[in-house]
Image (cartoon, rainbow, N blue to C red):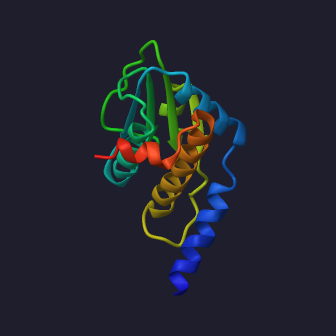
């Protein structure tokens, strides 16, 4: 299937270009926070729900101490209140207004794609964040068996 090959090629190009130091910073923020809130709208919101679910499977709590925003455009419909915690933006638009308001910006360079709309960004975000979960599993020494115990 030619389309699948194209999608996989584009995904690989985007995910392999993500800044490793920023990924390390994200992982450290997640490990060192009391609670995490993930925000996104539309398909990015679904990616956020998937990531949030895996964080719960790791035994991490939801809340407001660390806010992770997933937005291809860097725009969101709700207001982000700057609290004592940290905020992270995962976007393909590192020059957006929101990027100036957060503590950490992780850019997924998914601007050039033959796929419709922002499909490449949303797919890349899902793959990237699943990779973050795998790194968290290693750092927190949590295996899949333990995660299954927290599965809904």
Q: Spot the residue most to the top.
A: 84
Using the image, determine if residue 48 lies above or below residue 88.
below
Q: Nearer the viewer, residue 114 or 139?
A: 139
Q: Quadrant of residue 119?
A: bottom left
Residue occupying image coordinates x 61% and y 43%: 135
Residue 92 shows in the view: no
Q: Nearer the viewer, residue 83 or 27?
A: 27
Q: Spot the residue most to the bottom.
A: 1
Residue occupying image coordinates x 45% and y 20%: 34
Percent of width and height locating residue 48: 39, 45
Residue 30 shows in the view: yes
Q: Spot the residue most to the left.
A: 152
Q: Nearer the viewer, residue 52 or 148?
A: 148
Using the image, determine if residue 15 lies above or below residue 51.
below
Percent of width and height locating residue 132: 57, 44
Side of 24 where 77 appears, left or right: left
Percent of width and height locating residue 121: 50, 56
Q: How many marks?
A: 0
Using the image, determine if residue 140 lies above or below residue 65.
below
Using the image, determine if residue 91 lies above or below residue 16.
above
Side of 139 where 145 appears, left or right: left
Percent of width and height locating residue 138: 62, 41
Residue occupying image coordinates x 45% and y 34%: 68
């Amino acid at each position: 299937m030619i389309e699948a090959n194209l999608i996989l090629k584009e995904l690989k190009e985007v995910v392999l270009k993500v800044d490793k130091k920023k990924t390390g910073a994200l992982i450290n923020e997640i490990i060192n926070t009391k609670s995490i809130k993930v925000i996104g709208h539309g398909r990015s919101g679904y990616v956020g729900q998937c990531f949030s679910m895996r964080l719960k499977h790791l035994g991490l709590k939801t809340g407001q101490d660390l806010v992770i925003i997933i937005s291809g455009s860097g725009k969101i419909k709700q207001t982000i209140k700057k609290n004592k915690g940290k905020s992270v933006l995962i976007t393909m638009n590192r020059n957006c207004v929101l990027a100036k308001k957060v503590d950490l910006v992780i850019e997924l360079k998914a601007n050039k794609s033959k796929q419709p709309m922002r499909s490449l960004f949303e797919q890349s975000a899902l793959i990237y964040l699943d990779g973050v979960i795998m790194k968290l599993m290693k750092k927190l020494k949590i295996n899949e068996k333990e995660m299954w115990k927290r599965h809904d």
